[in-house]
Image (cartoon, grey):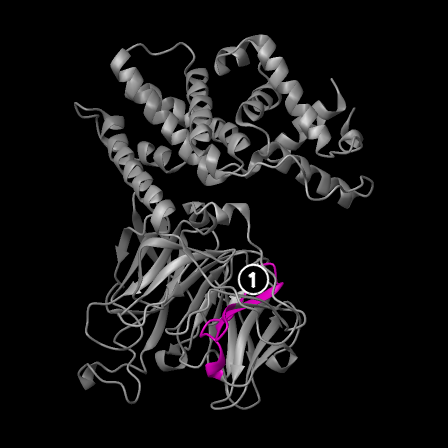
Amino acid sequence: MSGIEDIVRQVMASHDQEAPGAPDLFRALQGTPGPPSRRGKWSGLLVPLAAAAAVAAVVAASLGISATFRGHARPAGPGPPAQSHLSPAAQSHSPAALRRVPRYFAALTRTAAVQVMGGEAAVVRSTLTGRVLATVAPPRPYQIFTWVSAAADDRTFILAAQRYWPIASGDAGLPAERLDNTTPTVFFKMAFDPATRTAKLAKLAVPETIPSAQLAGMTVSPDGTRLALDLRQSIRVVTLATGAIRSWAWQGGGWIGNNKPIGQIFSWTADGTTLEFQQWEPGGPANIRLLDTTAPGTSLASSKTVLNFSNGGAFGLNTLLTPDGSRIVTATPQGITEFSARTGNPILSQDQFRAGWQEVLWASPGGTALVVSDPRGKTTGPSNVLGVLTGNTFTPIPHGADESIQIAW
Amino acid sequence: MDLDDALAELVAHSGDRLLRVAYQLTHDRAAAQDLVQEALLQVYRSMRRRGLPPEDWYAYLRRAVINEYLRARRLRSSGEVVTDRMPEQPVAGSPEDQIADRAQLWAALGALSARQRAALVLRYYEDLPDHQIAALLGCREASVRSLASRGLAVLRQLGVPAGIGEEDRP
């Protein structure tokens, strides 16, 4: 056998473990209870799947024809000239872009007419179809989910919950007796099972009592083992298996977290070592900093500033460090802008609009695929559109009206 | 054992193997799952109509996977840009280079035509003899040899250095 044949065998074998495990269909089949009906177990299971596949194909085809948008690439302010990373896949206008994003995402939803953060339920939706696949409510006595974050496996999410709506000073809409800034926040792991389309909650043993008013955000590590909590003037990282906590305090002025606070407050590198966060002062500058969570120390002063904005309104709520640690991605007046995490210089701006707000919700390892909330040029209307931005091509997520910034991939 | 139970048992025992073959063909986890599910769906419908379970279920499903892969690739052919040139030509030498070379070869496999890739996967991953590959692909043995030979030639042309893999040989 020639050398090239040996090499082909070795390379194929080396990628063997990357293949997926038994797919949803298999698990669903194995979980089908009871004796088969007259139609049989498979017929009952497969026909709906086939119908779903047909619907998905129609949606995909329509997306490819009519629903892929072009953004408007612009150079990103000062610094080196912007570069495009248009790819053949992006140019094909196919929903292949959607496949570059985790398959499921979670969002908080509410029915009450309140203009506050959170929701009475969390839904799991499909990135490919936008369909709601599962809905969960917090177990009593908790009634409101306030934060959501996603691990990298596309089906594990962390939720924060409390008893009542988190109404702060100046907010309105609910009776005073339901204001809640003092009861403890509790945390749940939500595991979504695509086979059964169920999401199950398991309460996490976070040992400290955190009053709801103190929690200003949270983000779980990509492997789902550690939860970073924003307590405004400190960051705590909880190891979920043991309950162990590490704390870093901010001794300077201002706050940790974005200026609402809302959205994805932190971001992690893929290896779970580096945590990106915002540090800002009201009316003053905002700094994007990186914390090495493996290094000794208890002060956030040891973190490194990699990017500076003149004020908190000069960029999006979310500033995401790409999982490979190379870039910071956020919305700016120039559009969705990527900055070097090493130098802080802008690298690329794309998808700019004159009106409306944008937000980056998720970034692929190198930032070449982004989930964004986008106005798509709309000057009126209540909602943005969720979509995947790849190489300055926007592929909308079906039924992706953005109704909640509390959303996580 | 009825058809449902037979398929269930097959899925339990051979599902992962089918998915690995599908992954070798598609290089995409989600696409591999879609491929296997579609193949299962087709086989199930076919067997309910014909009512004749094959002697070798795994081979039967593998054929469905291959057929579905080739069919899907034909439909998608206008949407993909296949290049015959790799952007970089690294020089083999250090372990880092060899890792890069293997990644390059994996990418190069993905750039082959669907039938060439199927022939190489069936020959070098599934270890099938050419006459079985010919039966699966619906062609003559000579065509299989040609597909494999041309596929390997493309890989060589794409700059896969001869050095990689040598340290692993007995």
The reply to whether residue A238 is visible in this rendering is yes
Residue A319 part of the magenta-drawn span:
yes
**For residue A154, side relative to residue B84 (left or right):** left
In this view, B95 is above or below B39 = below
Task: Pick whichever, B118 or A196, lies toward us.
Answer: B118
Q: Position of residue A345 (x, y in %)?
A: 64, 72
**For residue B52, side relative to residue B34 (left or right):** left
Task: Pick whichever, B160 or B75, lies toward us.
Answer: B75
Write down the residue under mark 1. Answer: A322
Q: Quadrant of the C terminus of chain A?
A: bottom left
Q: Which residue: 45% across, 61% down?
A: A71
Q: Position of residue A182 (x, y in %)?
A: 32, 82
In this view, A310 is above or below A332 = below
Q: Position of residue B55 (x, y in %)?
A: 40, 9
Please give the count of numbered marks on the rendered protein. 1
Q: Quadrant of the N terminus of chain A?
A: top right
- Where residue A274 sits, quadrant-wise, is bottom right
Q: Which residue: 72% across, 39% down?
A: B101
**For residue A360, side relative to residue A129 (left or right):** right
The reply to whether residue B129 is visible in this rendering is no
Mark 1 — on which chain does it sit? A
| Magenta residue span | A312-336
In this view, A345 is above or below A376 = below
Q: Residues within 10 Å of mark 1 (few under 14, many from 20)?
A: many
Tag 1: residue type?
Thr
Residue A308 part of the magenta-drawn span:
no
- Where residue A273 sits, quadrant-wise, is bottom right
Q: Position of residue B5 (x, y in %)?
A: 31, 21
